[in-house]
């Protein structure tokens, strides 16, 4: 999870200008102040980076950073060997 989580933190601090002091594994996207458009943009960014499908839905903003990183990691594992590389096709 560390690589996915670390990338998530990098995207949140860089692209979405979330303060590093606000970021903890248990904090939700909603608690970080991301609206539905920002959540969708974040999921698209992660999807592009990891090459796994991530569908935005109404519950995405309520996910903790740990849950989101775990979901990406689970999709990478399901995609099989070689898919854990950034940009790899599933």
Image: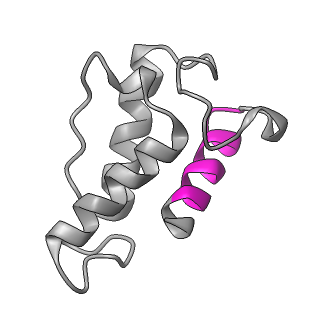
Q: Where is residue 50 in the image (x, y as percent from the top left)?
A: 34, 63
- Residue occupying image coordinates x 55% and y 57%: 5
Q: Where is residue 59 in the image (x, y as percent from the top left)?
A: 32, 20
- Residue occupying image coordinates x 61% and y 18%: 31
- Location of residue 28 with respect to 82 vertically, above or below: above
- Residue occupying image coordinates x 55% and y 27%: 28
Residue 47 shown left or right of residue 35 in the figure: left
Question: Would you say residue 9 sits in the magenta stretch?
Answer: yes
Question: How many tags in the picture?
Answer: 0
Image quadrant where residue 78 sits? bottom left
Q: How is the image coloured?
A: one colour
- Location of residue 50 with respect to 54 vertically, above or below: below
Q: Can residue 49 be seen in this view?
A: yes
Residue 27 shown left or right of residue 81 in the figure: right
Q: Can residue 90 be seen in this view?
A: no
Q: Which of 38 and 64 lies nearest the eye of the viewer?
A: 64
Outermost residue toward the front in this view: 26
Q: Position of residue 80 (x, y in %)?
A: 17, 78
- Location of residue 56 with respect to 90 vertically, above or below: above
Q: Where is residue 11 in the image (x, y as percent from the top left)?
A: 59, 47
Outermost residue toward the right in this view: 21
Residue 31 shown left or right of residue 80 in the figure: right
- Residue occupying image coordinates x 24% and y 71%: 77
Dominant SS of magenta comes to: helix
- Location of residue 4 with respect to 20 vertically, above or below: below
Q: Which of 67 and 82 lies nearest the eye of the viewer?
A: 67
Question: Would you say residue 83 sits in the magenta stretch?
Answer: no
**Which contiguous range is marked in magenta?**
5-17
């Amino acid at each position: 999870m560390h690589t996915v989580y670390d990338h998530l933190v990098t995207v949140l601090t860089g692209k979405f200008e979330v303060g590093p002091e606000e970021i903890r594994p248990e904090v939700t996207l909603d608690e970080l102040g991301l609206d539905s458009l920002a959540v969708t943009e974040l999921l698209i960014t992660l999807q592009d980076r990891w090459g796994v499908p991530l569908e935005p839905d109404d519950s995405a903003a309520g996910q903790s950073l740990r849950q989101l990183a775990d979901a990406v990691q689970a999709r990478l594992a399901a995609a099989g060997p070689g898919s854990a590389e950034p940009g790899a096709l599933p």
